[in-house]
Image (tube, helix red, strand yellow):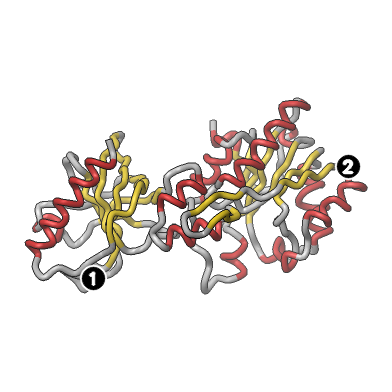
Amino acid sequence: MQEDRCIQGLVRIPKAVRRGVLTIGNFDGVHVGHRHILQMVRSIADAEDIPAVAMTFEPPPERILHPQSPSKRILPHRRKVRRLLEGGVDYVVVVPTDEMLLSMAPDEFIDRVIVKSLHPRHIIEGENFFFGLARSGNVNTLRQAGDTQGFTVKVLDPSRIELSGEGLSRVSSTLIRRLIAEGRVADAAMCLKNEFALYGKVVKGAGQGRTLDFPTVNLDCGEQIIPADGVYAARASLAGSTFRAAVSIGDKPTLGPAPRTVEAFLIDAQGDFYDQEIELSFVRKLRDQAQFDSAEMLREQIAKDVERVREIIE
């Protein structure tokens, strides 16, 4: 079970989690670069018959360090843990982030967080791994400590992907957030090896979709990053079913002004779905938001959008 494989905190680490292969990071999105590291962790763990372990932090350190302007999440925490486990590790250790943790010098972090808690045989990281106070520790710091603390360090090259108009780009959570914020959900999906998805609860909206004959579900997205304003083809999973969805993001320029919302018309669905959990997976951006001269013109455009979604998503 996932709960048995997710270790909360460092106080009581089961023996089965110690002396294994460890990777440490925020892992937001669990993108192709992270997956490359997870595959190496799994390979070494299998070869030596030892546990494969990922250590991550909650909340993300940036939310403590920059509380006024933290980065939005690509994945909610629970989904990230699930992706890490699906990516090949046996256990995920979640370290609570606080001021004490963030004030540790690199050597103290290695002694107290890594060695005392997990005593790994091997650590696998990307070349841009930093840790400790002011991110002053790096992979060379780890290597030097490993010589005396009894672990090896393997550093993997970053994963790169060809993006239209940008050439070969290093995959990172920062890059993926930018792509999503620009509405480039198909490019983000290439970096994630999964469609970007919003997860949340269906909340009550203004009910304007019903007046246009296209009732929508409204999504509370929590701390997740939201794609750029526009209309998207997507898949919606909720109530045990999956539907094609035409998703509108924006402030409803024709019927507004209104707060920025994420609303989805679920094709061939019945019911209101209030308070139910929903997963909204983005396939392609169809068009930008536009202001129409009348509600009837908007209704006609929505009908065209819905037909395009039917064509795009079988």
Asked if one can make out residue 125 in the rendered structure from this viewpoint, the answer is yes
Along the line of sight, which residue is nearer the eye, 230 or 115? Answer: 230
- Helix, strand or loop for disc 1: loop
| Image height of 153 relative to 218, above or below | above
Query: On the picture, is 156 further left or further right than 263?
Result: right
Q: Say which amino acid is labelled 2.
A: Gly
Give the residue at the far right of this rendering. 148
Residue 314 rendering spot, x and y as whole percentages: 27, 35
The residue beneath circle 1 is 258
143 on left or right of 91: right
Horizontal and vertical percent for residue 133?
75, 66
Q: Earlier in the sequence, mark 1 or mark 2?
A: 2
Amino acid residing under circle 1: Ala
The answer to whether marks 1 and 2 mark residues whose Cβ atoms lie closer than 8 Å is no
- What residue is rendered at 72% in x and 35% in y? 17
Residue 271 is left or right of residue 90, and the answer is left
Rendered residue at 64%/33% (across/down): 90
Question: In the rendered view, would you say 20 is above or below 278?
Answer: above
Where disc 2 sits, the SS reads: loop
Q: Which mark is residue 29?
A: none
Q: Quadrant of residue 150?
A: top right
The residue beneath circle 2 is 150
**Residue placed most toward the observer, 39 or 108:** 39
Category of crowding for the residue at label 2, using alpha-carbon neighbours closer than 10 angstroms: few (below 14), some (14–19), many (at least 20): few
Whether residue 10 is visible, yes or no, is no
Query: Which residue is rendered at x = 20% and y = 43% of the image?
Result: 267
Instruction: Give the Cα distance between marks 1 and 2.
Output: 59 Å
